[in-house]
Amino acid sequence: MAALRFSFPVLSAAAIVVALTAAPALAGDAASAHTTWRSCLGRAYVEGAAFTGRDLAADAALRSCRGEENAYLTALSDSPLLDADDIAQARPDLVARARAALLETVSGPRAVLR
């Protein structure tokens, strides 16, 4: 029993050390993937808005940046706090918020045919 009491604190301390050292790396990966996704969306939206309406440009940007979105969601799923169900449930809200943010952009080019 004494060995069990000794090994549990050692294991907990080791788990805490591993979590503290791995968490910033995981957070950095997710943050980097998020930045890459948002940059892709911004570029694709500006290019599309120059030729079409803002709604069409936002939808096209979301479609063209699906790979970056998947990389971001994969980075999020590597977190010990989230599982695949959490990511699947959060995806529609993330995409809707990204689309709304694109449509709120007022400094981008205006549609040619509007």
Image (tube, helix red, strand yellow):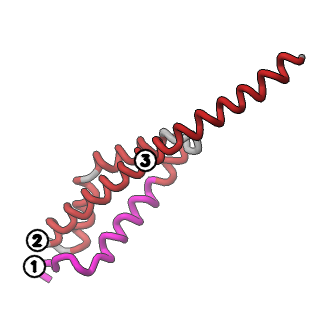
Give x and y (percent) for residue 90. Answer: 49, 54
Residue in view at x 72 percent, y 31 percent: 12
**Residue 6: % across, % down:** 81, 22
| First-in-chain label (1 vs 3) | 3
User: Which residue is labeled 1 in the image?
Assistant: 112
First to last magenta residue range: 91-114
Location of mark 2 (residue): 51
Distance (Cα) linking label 1 and label 2:
6 Å
Sequence-wise first label, 3 or 2: 3
In the rendered image, the vertical position of residue 99 relative to residue 78, given as above or below: below
Q: Nearer the viewer, residue 25 or 30?
A: 25
Residue marked by disc 3? 28
- Provide residue 85's location: percent of width, then percent of height: 54, 43
Residue 16 pos. (x, y %)? 65, 36
Say if 25 sits above or below 105 in the image. Answer: above
Under mark 1, the amino acid is: Val
Q: Name which quarter of the figure residue 95 lies in.
A: bottom left
Q: Residues within 10 Å of mark 2 (few under 14, many from 20)?
A: some
- How far is the residue under mark 1 from the one under mark 3? 39 Å
* Residue 114: quadrant of the picture: bottom left
Q: Which of the two discs, 1 and 3, sits closer to the camera?
A: 3
Amino acid at dot 3? Gly
Query: Which residue is painted at 10% across and 79% down in the image?
Result: 112
Which of marks 2 and 1 precedes in the sequence? Answer: 2
Label 3 to label 2, Cα distance in Å? 35 Å
Element at badge 1? loop
Find out whether the residues at labels 1 and 2 contact each other: C-beta distance under 8 Å. yes
Position of residue 11 relative to residue 59, above or below, is above
Residue 104 left/right relative to 9 = left
